[in-house]
Amino acid sequence: MKFYTSMPKSLKPYFKAELDKYRTESSIGNIQIAWNHLERAHIIGQKYPYAHTFVHWKMLQFGIKIKSGKEIIGQIPRLVFGGVKSFVGKIPFGNTGGANVPPLKPFPIEKGLQNIFAKAGIDLI
């Protein structure tokens, strides 16, 4: 079993860029675009416990901001267990992390994100 701890330096700029885009879009009221950047940050960071947990924390805050009971309730178990599952390498690759998708279901990773992983030298599986 492989234990994952911290995100590789080659991937951090992409993760940070998605979070920066999330903050920018959220601050100007582009809620759907902001959410999309959080989902992308989730996919980039889901293998790494701190990043994974941090994105779920941001998703919980987002749910509170938009007053979505479904998102708030859905993020609590993800926040509690997501980082643990990352640490032991048991994550559903491509899962976007929101309460609108089953928490353990993998999804295909969009081409743009596949390119990010490739540029960062990260194997998807």
Image (spheres, rainbow, N blue to C red):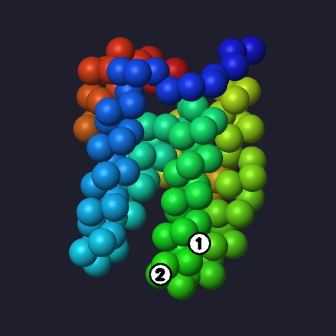
Residue drawn 58% across the image and 55% down it: 56
Residue 91 visible to the viewer: no
Residue drawn 68% across the image and 54% down it: 79
| Residue occupied by mark 1 | 71
Q: Position of residue 105 (x, y in %)?
A: 61, 47
Above-or-below relation of 21 to 50: below
Counting the numbered discs, the total is 2
Quadrant assignment for the N terminus:
top right
Q: Is residue 31 left or right of residue 84?
A: left
Above-or-below relation of 40 to 29: above
Residue 123 placement: quadrant: top left
| Element assignment for label 2 | loop
Q: Looking at numbered disc 1 in the image, what kind of residue is underneath it?
A: Glu
Q: Nearer the viewer, residue 79 or 112?
A: 79
Quick check: marks 1 and 2 in contact, CB under 8 Å? yes
User: How far is disc 1 from disc 2 in space, using C-alphas?
Assistant: 9 Å
